[in-house]
Amino acid sequence: MIETRKSFCRFCHAFCGIEANVDANNNQIVAIRGDRENPASGGYTCSKGRAELERLYHQERLLSSKKRVNGVFTEIGPQQALDEIAQKLREIIAQHGPRSVAIYVGCPGHRNSASGPKFLRKWLDAIGSPGYYSAFTVDSPSLSIARGRFWGGPMPLNYFDIANADVAMFIGTNPLVSHLFTVMPQSNPFKLLRDARQRGMKMIVVDPRRCEVAKQADLHLQLKPGEDATLLAAMLKLVIEQKLFNQDYVAAYASGLEELHDAVRDFDLDYAARRTEVPANLIEAAAVMFATAKRGGIQTGTGLAMARHQNLSTQLAMSLNGLCGRYDRRGGLTSHPTVLAPPLADPPEAIPLPLFPGPVSRIRGIKMINNPMGIQEMPSNTLTDEILTPSDGQIRALFVNGGNPALVFPDEAGTVQALKSLDLLVVNDLFMSATAKFAHYVLACKHPFERTDVAWLMDGSYSLPFMQYSPPLVKPAAGLFHEFEIFWDLARQIGIDLDIPGIGMDRKPTADEMLNGLFADARIPLGEIRKHPGGHVFGERDPKVNCILPHMICHPDKRMALGHPEVIEELLEVRAEPIIESGGYEVGEKFAYRMITYRIGDVYCTQGQNLPSVQRRSSYNPVLMNARDMEDLDVKDGELVQIGNDFGRVEGIARATRDLNQGVIGLAHGWGDPSDNRDVREKGTNVQALIPDDYRYDRVTGLALMSAVPVNVTAVARRFAGAD
């Protein structure tokens, strides 16, 4: 018997509503499609979501847990694995203390509501370890730093009301592919942009690549990678000096205008044009188009957040929004009532959450931050060295929950060395990932369609105050873990209490009980959310405006800080830097290119590369190059090139494109398993082998220079990749 069951996709953060055809007699999903009745996604699914059954029923999926013995993985029963891990964990804590234990949470781990960041932070707090690391501080810690400086603390103005905007500016983000919930409403982004454009909304895109959204833009500022701060400073100077900003709004809600103006005074259009390689008239046109529109907003993404001066660039974009009166206003950056968080007071009050809650890494003195979800997080780009560096607090036990550090951390060789050196490495995953190959234990976990979930990560980021709960669509195979079960049992065995309402240590909780405890203070009780299988809108559909400012600004003067001292200081540093015409950043560096990283639409970070439908289209991540650069190197499509810098060398497969300027190459991240000896045509290229974690890192977040990386490219002896 075929039944139709509603759920939501969890391949990425957008959580699009789906309908599944389930063969109830055989406990098998036979088809999935977008749920046209879903108020948020309206039937939309992307290629990743449509391939989700390939992941569920993949022939290489782990259906039993594994233990590595003498370099060989053998099956181990689920409870025996937990018993052995608990014994080892007790020994490590007894000998080295609780700081020796850490967790790394990847993108899939964030999409697991009962086992995600809220739960795992509770588990570490119970142990007494600060060691929560996640994908957020791999690519986006600037969001926390800039918000902390600009607002003084958390601010719920993260929903771009694009349906009412007259102008949108996207910087270093490609919402038609990336589906980042921090950029714009990501449920059905094609329709949202199409409707807005048909209504007359203008669109400006700032990106070194002529990406999918750039191809639809009215203005595309194809800047030199890593020069976002210079471009934004020049725009701010023009908007201030031509008095194009919203003077009444700034007088009411902002401070530091004079300080900001002084700091950007020398960023004139000609200087910015020479440095960014964007024509001066185009910079001016973009600034005027944005500032003179009645409504609109700027949103930034990982292309900016992984490049140089990312904290500064993120805040300058926020400052341009603030100058033009885009916050807490219709068509700008607004808010919806959250569903799973406690309701705000009326009027709302500032949330006194410190940016830096206290702990400091032993490595480079980088501080813990509070991330946008309110989770205290250590800097992931110090984790490798925290494992390798002896002394008090050295990490000796690491749990990887839905992540793949071997493919996403800078310094590939150092990361592999660190993973190999651990006393205990436990990986919770669906597959034997690049990281899992170094684990002592690999615990086989339930696929999202086999577990209970609620769409917590999108709370407040949907296009309306929507929430959806999903029970399992099918029953999992015996012995598979819902990840919280792993950590609950370990807590029980080592004798700690998780301090979650309704969760005791005498009986293993169900997923529903765990969700009830984690979201006990929700505005809408989970019992009510469960009544709506396809999700429900809990409140007014239009975003709230004119209700957040100035009440929730955490600075004592209740004003957004346009002239924050650290921003002013870094602006002066940027202006003092030399203009380099080649790929380097310093005089004397001999690099011909800057390398950007980008997203491939069929995969999400390190997920999806092994799916048959993806493999049929491409089994590797090509090195995108301007066709003229390839001609200069005498390289043709499909031929091997070597990419190198002072840190490393990799080979990749060249592909000509018109979407990059000369002197720029693109290489997608998340490919190239370091343990895989196959040719790059079969496994791809790991960009992280070119990125050190201790050179040109950000002094505040520790973030490595993950994009806009200086490199050289040379032709490999003429042969086609994969040829003998």
Image: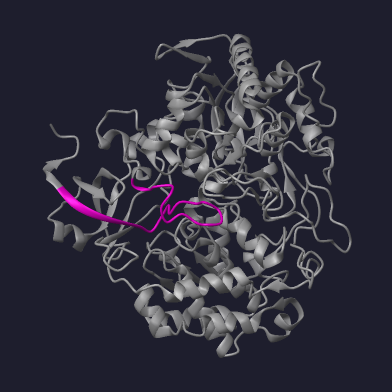
Image location (x, y in percent) of residue 312? 54, 66
Relative height, residue 193 to residue 514 (above, below): below
Which SS does the magenta portion mostly show? Answer: loop
Q: Quadrant of residue 336?
A: bottom right
Question: Which residue lies most toward the front here?
Answer: 391
Asked if residue 140 is among those painted magenta in the image, a careful observer would answer no
The answer to whether 156 appears left or right of 688 in the picture is right
Instruction: Tell me, yes or no, if residue 255 can be seen here.
Output: yes
- Residue in view at x 72 percent, y 34 percent: 125
Residue ID at (45%, 51%): 704
Residue 1's place in the image compared with 257, above or below, is above
Q: Is residue 631 left or right of residue 188?
A: left
Residues shaded magenta: 690-715
Q: Residue furthest right?
A: 346
Q: Nearer the viewer, residue 431 or 528?
A: 431
Taking the spot 61% from the left edge, 59% from the top edge, the residue there is 145
Q: Is residue 320 above or below residue 610?
A: below
